[in-house]
Structure formats: C-alpha cells, structure tokens
Image (cartoon, coloured by chain):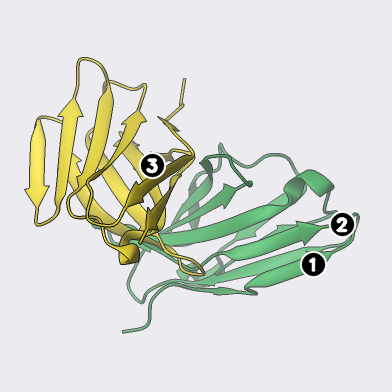
Amino acid sequence: GEDVEQSLFLSVREGDSSVINCTYTDSSSTYLYWYKQEPGAGLQLLTYIFSNMDMKQDQRLTVLLNKKDKHLSLRIADTQTGDSAIYFCAESRTGNQFYFGTGTSLTVIP
Amino acid sequence: EAGVTQFPSHSVIEKGQTVTLRCDPISGHDNLYWYRRVMGKEIKFLLHFVKESKQDESGMPNNRFLAERTGGTYSTLKVQPAELEDSGVYFCATRVDTGELFFGEGSRLTVL
C-alpha cells in the first residue's frame, strides 16, 4: 500500500522534548523527509534522511530511522512555542514520487 | 527570489460550479506537482508535470479534474463540475531535477 501513517495530535510543555512518529510501507523508499507547516503557510522542508542512515542530527532536531520496522521519528529538543505547527512525514520512491502522511499537529503549551 | 505562488488562497463555490486553481512555480523548476489534503487526511498526490508534459497523473481522482501546464511555466487545475468531496486544500510544489520540493501556501477549496 501507499500509506504513511502518523498520529494526528501531540501536546508538549515548553522546554520538553517532542517526539513525532511515522510509519511507512515501502521498503524501497530512497529518502524520508520531515516537513513543517505553520498556520497559513506552505510546507517547508525541515530535514531529511537517506534510507541507508539510522540517525541524523541537526541542532535541536534528531531523526531516527528503523528500516526493519519502517519507522521514522523526529525528536525536537527543548521545544519552543514557535515549534507549534503541523509536521508531515514523507517518503520518496523511484519515479520521482512523494508520499505524505496525515500530519501531526504539535501544540506547545507555555 | 519569489517562491511558489498559488491563487486563489481560498475559493468558496457551490456544487456543480467550476473552479480553476493556478500555480506559478519558482523560475527554472521543471518539475511541478499538485497535491490535495482533505481535512484530517494525508496529503495525496494528484499529478506531476515535467515542463509541459504530464509525467504521472495517476492520482487524479476522476475526469472532473483537468490540469494543464501550457508552455511549461504556470499550471492550472480545473475542477468541473465541483462536488462536495472535492473540498480540501490543494498544494502545488515545484523543484529542479532532484532537489528540494518547494511548496506554495495552498488553495483552500470549499464546495457547498
């Protein structure tokens, strides 16, 4: 199937870590992505990981990839109110195709 | 440099009417994608242009949807006649060959 699945909602307190999870179905995916959508804006690429990597760290963001379980996660350290947004997981496959999840709406409570 | 721009930002029409959405890509981006997000659901692929050619239109829901990209620049997505289930946010995204996908802000369509 084509499904990329995410939880719809997540709430965390400011300063805590947030972990957003995603499962995908296609083991042939080449890249996996995290996009962020702020209110009234388009999706912006946050970070990505190549499918032969297990982990990627970029400042407050850590991406973990478990290929065996087809599980991708995004950890945001020291979550701030400005991190409140919808986060989309996406995978790219051969043929230039992208498949997106439902998006996880992150609410940061001050 | 201007980003991907979409017009209109929001359109409210009645069932049976026609709506045309427009996407202006970033200059030089040959690849142009249309996606749709229905509330609470995933962002679903509709189709992919490479320049003016339809590379993949497997995601188009039915023949009420028509996408064009004459001249390989801007693209339009027409829905005729619109149905209630067509409501959602239509995103356009563009990129060069293998680079990052850049998204527009989306066009919200509400069919009453």
Residue A98, labelled with which disc?
A: 3
Secondary structure at badge 2 equals loop
- Decide if residue B67 is on the left or right side of residue B96: right
- In the image, residue B93 above or below residue A20: below
Colour used to depict chain A in the structure image: yellow
For marks 2 and 1 on the same chain, the one whose residue lies earlier in the sequence: 1
Could you tell me if the residues under marks 2 and 1 are in contact, i.e. CB atoms within 8 Å? yes
Amino acid type, label 3: Phe
Residue indicated by mark 1 = B12
Residue position for label 2: B112
Cβ atoms at labels 3 and 1 below 8 Å apart = no
The chain letter for the residue carrying disc 2 is B
- Rendering coords of residue A81 (x, y %): 33, 64
**Distance from the alpha carbon under mark 3 to that under mark 1:** 28 Å
Q: Secondary structure at mark 1?
A: strand
Q: Residue at x 82, y 53 (%)?
A: B82
- Residue A26, by quadrant, is top left
Pointer 3 chain: A
Q: Residues within 10 Å of mark 1 (few under 14, many from 20)?
A: few
Looking at the picture, how far across and down is residue A95, in whole percent?
34, 37
Say the numbered circle drawn on residue A65: none
